Each structure stands twice: as structure tokens, then as C-alpha cells.
């Protein structure tokens, strides 16, 4: 058990999701590793490679020395290039190689978490040579592996765990991005409110309020006169917010009341993951 309670929820959520990932991919035959996932341009193998790669970096392992091919057109910035390195280096690995490396990496990471004695504000490695607090790193690992678990479930047609511990963390992380999406990116007018009503395995209602200066904030109190109300199910919400689907593809699953143009602008800006 981790020393600091503030880290335990993240460790538990991470464990739940990575164990689900290991269980999902263990029985796959070679061809199934090439199935496309909702994560843009990544196959089942690529998603698992990404999980392995980031977890090894959390362990402090050196990054691979590898040159990316020039024809990876989905790699458009330094962050994507950084993440793609751990993926591309494993693109020709066999199914047994993938499952054995995943299992070994998860054993090492679980041991690291059991023996974790650092404080939540300890600075640790982050992408592109940056640093972040241990608490943020563990929170984002819990976020990342739950989203990628869902990528794999979609690709393999094995739905589940939409209400698992990781889902609660994903909800909280995505909600933190809503004020910027509504106020800055979509340009909601000052002194307005936008209501997001989500139902399904994870249910919540949040109001994004834009003040007189155009700054947004989010709270759980309903608004009496919102300029826009978006009602949608949890799966559609996270898939939109994580860039797994475009608004036009799920238009029948999003109910819009109020200013249609602003609603469309909000949905266009809804994807907040890199």
C-alpha cells in the first residue's frame, strides 16, 4: 500500500485497468493484434506498446534508441513523436513477445507501487524531458490506462468497466477541461451558462458558467436559464472528449437544447486529449 492516501485511489484505478488490459490481450491470436482501435492510427498492438512504454519510463528505464519512419502521417508534433517512439519500436513484435513484456512490466510496476514511499509532491519524469509531481503522474497514468482499456474493448468487441475506478478519475480530469472548452475555445458569451447532463454508468450534471470577463468555471449546481444544454450518455461523452469519435458520428446520441451554433462550437472543441 502506498504511504500517502492521496495516491492510493490512483494506484487502485491503475491496477484495475492494467489487469483488465492484460486479461483482454492474453488470448489474442497474431492477427487480432493488428485490429484498428478508436485511438487514431493505433492498432491493438500499438495501444499495448504505448502502455508498456510509458510504464517502463515510470520505472526509470531508458527510452529506446530508434528512428521513426517518415511516413507516419499522424505524427505531427513533438509530443506525438515522443509517444510514437515506444510504439513504433514494437510494431514487429509477436503476440508472445507483447504479452510477456506486458506481464513483466506490470509485475515491476506493481512492485514499485507497493513500495512507494515518496510524497505526492515529489518531482518525477514527464514526457519531453519535463517534470511533474508524482501525484499528477499517477493520476494521468490511471486516466490513460482506463481510456486505452476502452480502446481495446471497442476494437475487440468486449465492452465493460465503463463504471470502474478509472472511469471516475477520467470523469474528473475531463470536467476540469470544460471551462476552457466552453469559454475560450467555443467562445460562449460573457454572463452565460452551459449545462452538460450525462447519463449512463457514470452520471453527472455540471454547469459551466462564463463570467463577465469571459472566464469559465464549472460546478454541480443547475442553471435556471442555460444558453445551451447538452444531454448525452457517458460513453459518448468520454469518446468525444478523448478524441475517439467526431461529433457528426454521434449526433444521434447528443441532445441539444438552446443555441445550436454555440452547441456545435462546443462539440467541435470537445476533444481535449493530446
Image (cartoon, grey):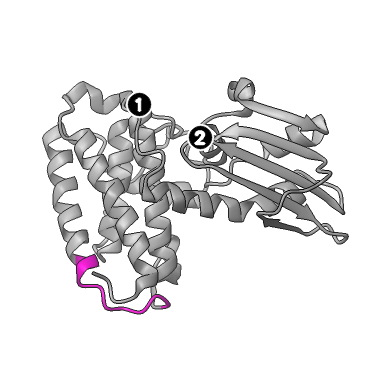
The image position of residue 250, as x and y in percent, is 59, 24
Q: Name the residue under label 1.
A: 155
Closer to the chain start, of discs 1 and 2, is 1
Q: In this view, does 273 lie to the left or right of 101?
A: right
Q: Which of 91 and 200 is in front in this view?
A: 200
Residue under the point 74% across and 32% down: 264
- Res. 45 image quadrant: top left
Q: Where is residue 51 in the image (x, y as percent from the top left)?
A: 30, 47
Cα distance in 3D space between marks 1 and 2: 21 Å
Is 26 drawn above or below residue 31 in the view shown? below
* Lateral position of residue 19 relative to residue 158, left or right: left
Question: SS for tag 1?
Answer: helix
Which residue corresponds to the image point at 64% horizontal and 39% vertical from the top-left? 197
Could you say which is closer to the camera, residue 74 or residue 141? Answer: 141
Left or right of 269? Residue 18 is left
Question: Mark 2 highlights which residue?
Answer: 200
Helix, strand or loop for disc 2: loop
Location of residue 78 in the rendering, given as x and y in whole percent from the top left corner: 49, 52
Near mark 2 (Cα within 10 A), the count class, few <14, some 14-19 or many ≥20, is few
Amino acid at each position: 500500500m502506498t504511504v500517502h492516501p492521496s495516491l492510493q485511489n490512483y494506484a487502485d484505478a491503475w491496477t484495475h485497468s492494467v489487469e483488465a488490459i492484460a486479461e483482454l490481450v492474453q488470448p489474442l491470436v497474431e492477427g487480432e493484434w493488428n485490429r484498428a482501435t478508436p485511438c487514431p492510427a493505433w492498432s491493438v498492438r500499438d495501444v499495448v506498446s504505448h502502455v508498456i512504454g510509458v510504464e517502463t519510463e515510470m520505472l526509470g528505464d531508458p527510452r529506446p534508441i530508434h528512428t521513426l519512419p517518415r511516413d507516419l502521417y499522424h505524427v505531427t508534433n513533438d509530443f506525438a513523436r515522443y509517444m510514437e517512439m515506444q510504439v513504433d519500436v514494437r510494431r514487429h513484435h509477436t503476440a508472445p513477445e507483447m504479452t510477456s513484456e506486458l506481464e513483466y512490466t506490470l509485475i515491476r510496476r506493481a512492485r514499485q507501487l507497493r513500495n512507494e514511499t515518496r510524497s505526492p509532491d515529489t518531482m518525477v519524469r514527464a514526457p519531453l524531458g519535463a517534470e511533474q509531481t508524482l501525484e499528477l503522474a499517477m493520476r494521468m497514468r490511471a486516466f490513460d490506462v482506463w481510456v486505452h482499456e476502452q480502446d481495446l474493448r471497442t476494437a475487440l468487441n468486449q465492452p465493460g468497466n465503463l463504471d470502474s475506478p478509472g472511469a471516475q478519475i477520467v470523469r474528473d480530469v475531463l470536467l476540469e477541461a470544460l471551462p476552457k472548452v466552453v469559454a475560450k475555445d467555443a467562445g460562449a458569451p460573457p454572463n452565460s451558462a452551459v449545462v452538460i447532463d450525462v447519463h449512463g454508468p457514470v452520471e453527472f450534471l455540471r454547469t459551466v458558467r462564463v463570467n463577465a470577463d469571459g472566464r469559465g468555471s464549472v460546478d454541480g449546481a443547475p442553471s435556471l436559464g442555460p444558453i445551451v444544454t447538452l444531454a448525452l450518455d457517458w460513453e459518448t461523452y468520454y469518446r468525444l472528449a478523448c478524441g475517439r469519435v467526431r461529433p457528426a458520428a454521434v449526433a444521434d446520441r447528443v441532445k441539444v437544447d438552446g443555441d445550436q451554433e454555440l452547441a456545435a462550437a462546443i462539440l467541435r472543441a470537445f476533444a481535449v486529449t493530446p
